[in-house]
Image (cartoon, helix red, strand yellow):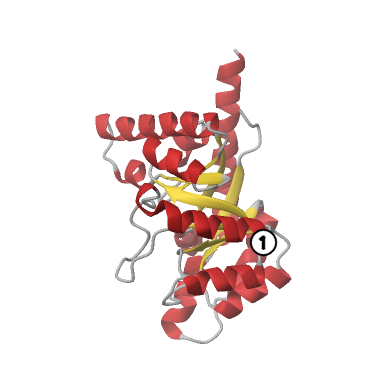
Amino acid sequence: MSEKLRLGVNIDHVATIRNARGGDHPEPVRAAKLAAAAGADGLVCHLREDRRHISDRDLERLMAEVDLPLNLEMAATDEMLEIALRHSPPGICLVPEKRQELTTEGGLDVAAAAPRLASFVASLSSAGCLVCLFVDPNAAQLDASLAAGAAAVELHTGTFCDAPPGAAGQAELERLRDASTYAASLGLEVRAGHGLSFDSVAPIAAIPEIVELNIGHFLIGEAIFSGLDSSIRRMRALMDKARAEALGERSA
């Protein structure tokens, strides 16, 4: 188990608020710098086909002005590949994308799109990007991710976060635990994200194979009430507490 659990802060929805009215405020780059000061280990942003969140200019500025590694979420399209190869961010996370969806609704079907995804992974890896695939906690998708050449997977936690308390939530948590163990056994770096909040983060942070959590919407929403610095610091503290307790249980 890694003692340090990384936190990637997704700043997409700072741009969403800005775009609702136009203009320059609130500024994603300012939010990214605040995230760095509050204890984030990396930044996440999703450059969508319709540019509903960050813009191409935002991406350029984040790469140039913020001293944190950037994980660019993107669909496996020719346009996004060209952009990614032009900027070569440290990390790329390939995600499914449908124009009509409000947010990413599940993991990539890597098994069904293996040849195309393998080509994308190879091109991005050759450019020096660490490529991660966003997948559901499913062994077949993990096998396909390894075969496609990915270095990491991000397990979709949305179903767990949306599950009612009790048996359904516990079953989803067990799926994530099993998938994390299996992915790590394949040599894949294991990350997790989607829908995580103060209430749901601890059980995920306690999974020993997970080395990074990527969280955005909840932190930006909570910032309305407590400020971005406060929301990130509280999330960081909850993650660290859950990981420390899990380490203590394993060593006991």
Q: Residue at x 45, y 68 (%)?
A: 77
Q: Which residue is mark 1?
A: 127
Image quarter hosting the C terminus: top right
Image quarter hosting the N terminus: top right
Q: Position of residue 157 (x, y in %)?
A: 40, 44
For this orientation, the residue located farthest to the front is 115
Q: Residue at x 66, y 37 (%)?
A: 4
Residue 103 appearing in the image: yes
Q: Nearer the viewer, residue 141 or 191?
A: 141
Instruction: Indicate left or right for 139 with 79 as reference.
Output: left
In the displayed structure, 168 sits above or below 50; it is: above
Q: Position of residue 177 (x, y in %)?
A: 43, 30
In the displayed structure, 102 sits above or below 219; it is: below
Q: Nearer the viewer, residue 218 or 149?
A: 149
Q: Residue at x 39, y 52 (%)?
A: 108
In the displayed structure, 244 sits above or below 238; it is: above
Q: Tell me the kind of residue under disc 1.
A: Ala
Residue 208 appearing in the image: no
Kind of element beneath mark 1: loop
> How many marks do you count on the picture?
1
The crowd level at tag 1 (other Cα within 10 Å; few <14, some 14-19, many 20+) is some
Q: Nearer the viewer, residue 21 or 1?
A: 1
In the displayed structure, 85 sits above or below 140; it is: below
- Where, by quadrant of the figure, is residue 34 drawn? bottom right
For this orientation, the residue located farthest to the bottom is 23
